Image: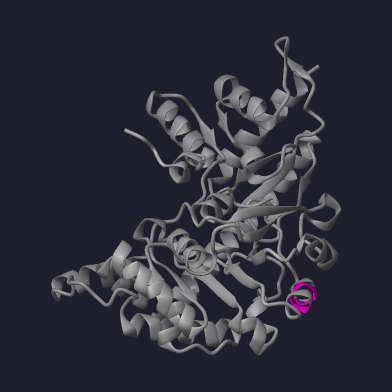
């Protein structure tokens, strides 16, 4: 059977592939430390799980409007006003099957064949694949380590062409853990406000921010930037609800209507029970305590993994958000392990998994050929054990 060019050009997720390999080895009895996790290692809070059970007991299990329950959309509007100072109406919100689905919807709604979409690198490996699925052309801006791998206004300006349709901003960033400051976002907004370029602002890690300052959404800059921005967010990271698959877009009403129309044919509504659980997530006062406790735990582990990495001598970007450390392995490339030259982060990752029982994510498919991503969404003991093994590996190279 012939496979379409559209499907053939899409690369499988390296993150999921390595995570699956690590899980397989662990199931076989290997003492694997996996730094690959892209999800919090917390269970969904009990009050959210109880809300889901309650919705089932009440028979609230039928179809909802394709774009989501109106009460949930209102709750999301309330969240955006409270946390970001942004006013939206329920008609501006589309609730989807996770933030990844919301990103896909956004691309499909605004990107035509041949349109260019600017993606600062390093990037989450799914972004370019979603652009290509929409018929667009990813245009990469290779950011500098000395800037914390954050795109500057000058770099953005130089990437814009007459074909530029959109830009993807991810703040806090996966895989680097970097956080754009308010001033840095404003400098980008000033460039974009002179154009009609759309912004897809992925703010899924918003609540995992250790800078002490709130995340500033580019949509806050002006009414024009708000109308040209599609905010993507959800509950997967903030409330440890990855498997519940609830994300959303907030955008101009006309764009939201287009997204809703597409979603009505592609998937219909997101899971009804998960929608009721999400209403509870956002409205129950227990939510703030959970977020605070999870934030404190990740901040502690962030400091722990940095202190352990310092012992290895391998450089890294000190993370300010999310739960990732971006480790620079350029100094290890070209060295040999057991006589074999290590010529890529993937080669390093394979040795770490096979010989040192450590799973890491090589970042070639994240737009960086010299780095590895470590997730610290694991226990303190595994952080220490895993980084110690990485240090031992580095010490054996010649």
Please state which of residues 93 and 380 is positioned toward the viewer in this rendering: 93
28 lies above or below 13: above
Residue 205 seen in render: yes
309 lies above or below 71: above
Please state which of residues 209 and 67 is positioned toward the viewer in this rendering: 67
Tell me the residue at 50%/43% (across/down).
10
Please state which of residues 357 and 361 is positioned toward the viewer in this rendering: 361
Tell me the residue at 46%/42% (across/down).
5
Tell me the residue at 75%/18% (across/down).
396
Q: Dividing the image into 4 quarters, which one contains the C terminus?
A: top right
Visual colour scheme: one colour
Whole-percent x, y for residue 126 in the image: 54, 50
Stretch in magenta = 186-190
Left or right: 378 in relation to 93:
right
For residue 187, which quarter of the picture? bottom right
Whole-percent x, y for residue 224 in the image: 66, 86
Q: Main secondary structure of the magenta part?
A: helix
Left or right: 73 in relation to 217:
left
Tell me how many marks there are: 0
Residue 281 seen in render: no
Whole-percent x, y for residue 177 in the image: 67, 56
Q: Dividing the image into 4 quarters, which one contains the N terminus?
A: top left
**Magenta stretch: includes residue 138:** no
296 lies above or below 225: above
Whole-percent x, y for residue 105 in the image: 45, 65
Tell me the residue at 68%/45% (across/down).
367
For residue 297, which quarter of the picture? bottom right
Q: Residue furthest top?
A: 339
Left or right: 89 in relation to 187:
left
**Magenta stretch: includes residue 187:** yes
């Amino acid at each position: 059977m012939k496979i379409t060019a559209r499907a053939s050009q899409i690369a499988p997720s390296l993150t999921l592939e390595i995570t699956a390999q690590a899980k397989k080895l662990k199931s076989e009895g290997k003492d694997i430390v996996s730094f690959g996790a892209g999800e919090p290692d917390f269970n969904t809070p009990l009050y959210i799980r109880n809300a889901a059970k309650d919705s089932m007991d009440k028979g609230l299990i039928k179809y909802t409007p394709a774009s989501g329950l109106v009460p949930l959309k209102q709750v999301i509007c309330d969240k955006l006003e409270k946390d970001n100072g942004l006013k939206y109406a329920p008609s501006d919100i589309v609730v989807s099957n996770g933030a990844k689905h919301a990103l896909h919807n956004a691309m499909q709604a605004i990107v035509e064949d041949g349109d260019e979409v600017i993606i600062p690198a390093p990037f989450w490996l799914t972004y370019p694949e979603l652009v290509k699925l929409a018929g667009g052309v990813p245009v990469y801006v290779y950011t500098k380590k000395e800037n914390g791998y954050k795109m500057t206004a000058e770099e953005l300006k130089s990437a814009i062409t007459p074909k530029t349709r959109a830009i993807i901003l991810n703040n806090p960033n996966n895989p680097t853990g970097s956080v754009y400051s308010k001033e840095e976002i404003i400098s980008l907004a000033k460039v974009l406000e002179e154009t009609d370029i759309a912004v897809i602002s992925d703010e899924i890690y918003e609540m995992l921010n250790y800078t002490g300052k709130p995340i500033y959404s580019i949509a806050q800059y002006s009414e024009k930037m708000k109308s040209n921005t599609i905010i993507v967010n959800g509950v997967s990271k903030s409330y440890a609800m990855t498997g519940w698959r609830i994300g959303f877009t907030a955008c101009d009403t006309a764009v939201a209507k287009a997204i809703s129309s597409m979603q009505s044919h592609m998937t219909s509504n997101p899971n009804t029970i998960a929608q009721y659980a999400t209403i509870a997530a956002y409205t129950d006062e227990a939510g703030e305590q959970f977020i605070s406790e999870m934030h404190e735990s990740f901040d502690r582990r962030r400091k722990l993994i940095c202190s352990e990495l310092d012992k290895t001598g391998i450089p890294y970007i000190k993370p300010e958000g999310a739960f990732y450390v971006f480790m620079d392995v350029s100094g290890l490339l070209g060295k040999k392990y057991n006589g074999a030259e290590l010529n890529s982060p993937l080669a390093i990752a394979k040795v770490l998994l096979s010989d040192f029982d450590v799973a890491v994510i090589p970042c070639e498919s994240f737009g960086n050929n010299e780095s590895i991503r470590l997730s610290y969404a694991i226990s303190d003991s595994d952080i220490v054990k895993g980084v110690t093994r990485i240090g031992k590996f580095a010490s054996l190279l010649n």
